């Protein structure tokens, strides 16, 4: 039986099955845009939750480097790709670890595990500059320690097998490597914004629980595409940790690419999500 006009007008409040799909389902009555994080928040430094979050980022990045660098070395150590997990296995190791670690640390630090992610969220005013800088420092320290433990377990193979350091592969220009890092990081950070969008979380209760899955899957897919080009950085801490512990000239030649590329990609993703997807600047103008 067809609904009456007033029933349709009431919409989701009376008939949930008629609730529109997508962002049109969200009204101003049940969601308010969270205020932007302050640039500086001195009170954070005296809060245990601030330091706990930094420790969580350190441990997560440490574990991330430990597992992924070991996986890369295992593939390079094999006589051929068929005797190892291959590129697909490396991609799964990176994506799977991000999935697991974001799930474990999201409630403590937000589960960034990547300076590029932290930078993108900072540009979108999701966290203060104080917290962003602290996270990046702890992520880099964790990455250095993670790669260092791998080298400590097997120092000779670590040096002979490349130590998981990122370089632009022969046959590709620096511009190609930079482009691959920009686009790859854009995919990752755009996924992070979409998976953790507070507006979606307010509408769909399952979104926060599932957030680590698309983020990890994005990392997996980007690795499949860009391992042959740059070994896939998209994470300056990961690239820095491996480069410092490996410490060969060729690992530093293109190292700037693995900072500039991810930061540009993260900035573009932040702008795209904030201005185009969420149109937050336009909402502010309409209210004033």
Image (cartoon, rainbow, N blue to C red):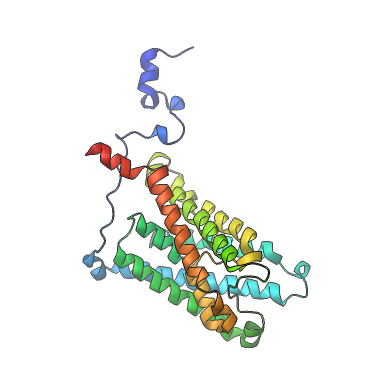
Is 113 in front, or is 129? 129
Is 147 in front, or is 239? 239
Which residue is located at x 51 percent, y 56 percent?
188
User: Does the image show residue 67?
Assistant: yes
Which residue is located at x 45 percent, y 53 percent?
269
Q: Position of residue 255 (x, y in %)?
A: 52, 74
Above/below status of 14 relative to 208: above
User: Does the image show residue 63?
Assistant: no
Q: Position of residue 124 (x, y in %)?
A: 35, 54
Res. 53 image quadrant: bottom left
Q: Number of numbered discs present?
A: 0
Is 13 in front, or is 140? 140
Which residue is located at x 74 percent, y 75 percent?
78
Q: Position of residue 36 (x, y in %)?
A: 28, 52
Res. 8 image quadrant: top left
Which residue is located at x 43 percent, y 40 percent?
204
Give the left or right position of residue 254, taking residue 287 as reference. Answer: right
Q: Position of residue 210 (x, y in %)?
A: 49, 49
Above/below status of 231 relative to 152: above
Q: Quadrant of the C terminus?
A: top left
């Amino acid at each position: 039986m067809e609904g009456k006009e007033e029933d349709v007008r009431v919409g989701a409040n009376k008939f949930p099955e008629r609730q529109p799909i997508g962002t049109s389902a969200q009204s101003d009555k049940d969601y308010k845009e969270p205020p932007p994080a302050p640039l500086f928040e001195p009170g954070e430094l005296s809060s245990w939750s601030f330091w706990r979050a930094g420790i969580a980022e350190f441990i997560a990045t440490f574990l991330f480097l430990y597992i992924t660098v070991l996986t890369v070395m295992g593939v390079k150590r094999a006589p051929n790709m068929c005797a190892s997990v291959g590129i697909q296995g490396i991609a799964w190791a990176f994506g799977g670890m991000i999935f697991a670690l974001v799930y474990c640390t999201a409630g403590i630090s937000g589960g960034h595990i990547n300076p590029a992610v932290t930078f993108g969220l900072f540009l979108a005013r999701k966290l203060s500059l104080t917290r962003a800088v602290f996270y990046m420092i702890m992520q880099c320290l964790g990455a250095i320690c993670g790669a260092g433990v791998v080298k400590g377990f097997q120092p000779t193979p670590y040096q002979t097998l490349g130590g998981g350091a990122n370089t632009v592969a022969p046959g590709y220009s620096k511009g190609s490597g930079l482009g691959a890092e920009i686009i790859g990081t854009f995919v990752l950070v755009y996924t992070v914004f979409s998976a953790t969008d507070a507006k979606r979380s307010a509408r769909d209760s399952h979104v926060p629980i599932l957030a680590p899955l698309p983020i990890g899957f994005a990392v997996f897919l980007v690795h499949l595409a860009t391992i042959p080009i740059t070994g896939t950085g998209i994470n300056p801490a990961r690239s820095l940790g491996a480069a410092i512990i490996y410490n060969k000239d060729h690992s530093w030649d293109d190292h700037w690419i693995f900072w500039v590329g991810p930061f540009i990609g993260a900035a573009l993703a932040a702008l795209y999500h904030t201005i185009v997807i969420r149109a937050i600047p336009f909402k502010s103008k309409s209210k004033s």
